[in-house]
Image: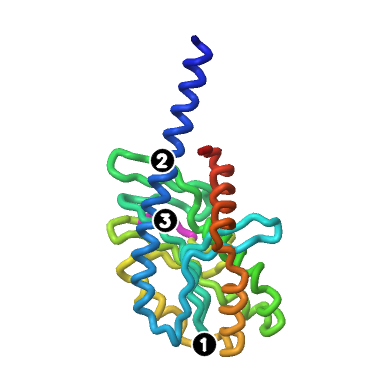
Amino acid sequence: MLIFIIILFFLVLKLKKYLKYKKITKIGETGEALVNEILSSLNPKKYFVLNNIILEHPNKRTSQVDHIIISRKAIFVIETKNYSGVLFGNIKNRYWLHISGKNKHSVYNIAAQNQGHINAIKNNINNILLNNISYRKYKKFFVSVLLFKNNCKVKIKKPLFYNLKSKKIIICNFGNLVKIIKKTRRRNVISKKLYKEIISEITNNNLSSKKKLKSHIKQIRKYNNIKK
């Protein structure tokens, strides 16, 4: 009887963890859909928008990137968090604290998370970039955008550029996203030819098939110790 109670207890814990994961996933999908709509207002001749892109790392792990905006000014990599409340963090810390009402929970450093996405993009387009431009220019291409709901207060302690390969980090909300993208860097640093090649390479390497998506979700569940 005691063994049965213990097993039942652990099953309930697993179920709660899984349901919490499903709730967070659903909230995230809602936020991403709203951002898709916001980004559709960008001039398609100047900004090529890719949503929900899955790219593979050299070690065969995958990264799911919410949004990639390719322009001749920069490549914007957006990580969307559909949070309410307050988010406290420091670029140096592995985890940040999210407070919403009476609920408190730690979240993995979102800047580091998005840096992982940028690394995945770099791994997929390194050859065409390094064959066309100097590494000095190449480092300036990527802009990391951490995007939050309008009613989420983000309190990140400086320095914002601590030990991150992406030197440009933007923290903004849904309401001023488009304005900030348009204002970021006036000068073109990517040629027309390279612009088209980058779009082609990322599009061709996108693994967003149902099979690959299931594999990516399986990776996340394994990392978070979540079972069906």
What residue lies at 48% left-to-right and 74% top-to-bottom? 69
Q: Position of residue 149 (x, y in %)?
A: 32, 59
What is the CA distance from the residue labelled 2 to the residue labelled 1? 44 Å
Determine which residue is flagged by label 2. 20
Which image quadrant is residue 16 in? top left
Residue 181 versus residue 46 in the image, above or below: above
Nearer the camera: disc 3 or disc 2? 2
Report if the CB atoms under discs 1 and 3 are less than 8 Å apart.
no
Residue under the point 34% across and 71% down: 38
- Magenta-colored stretch includes residue 99: no
Mark 3: amino acid:
Ile
Label 3: element kind: strand
Q: Quadrant of residue 30?
A: bottom left
Q: Mark 3 = which residue?
A: 156
Q: Bounds of the magenta span? A: 154-159
Q: How many marks?
A: 3
**Residue where numbered disc 1 is placed:** 188
Residue 136 in the figure: left or right of residue 171: right
Q: CA distance from mark 3 to mark 2?
A: 25 Å
User: Mark 2 or 1 closer to N-term?
Assistant: 2
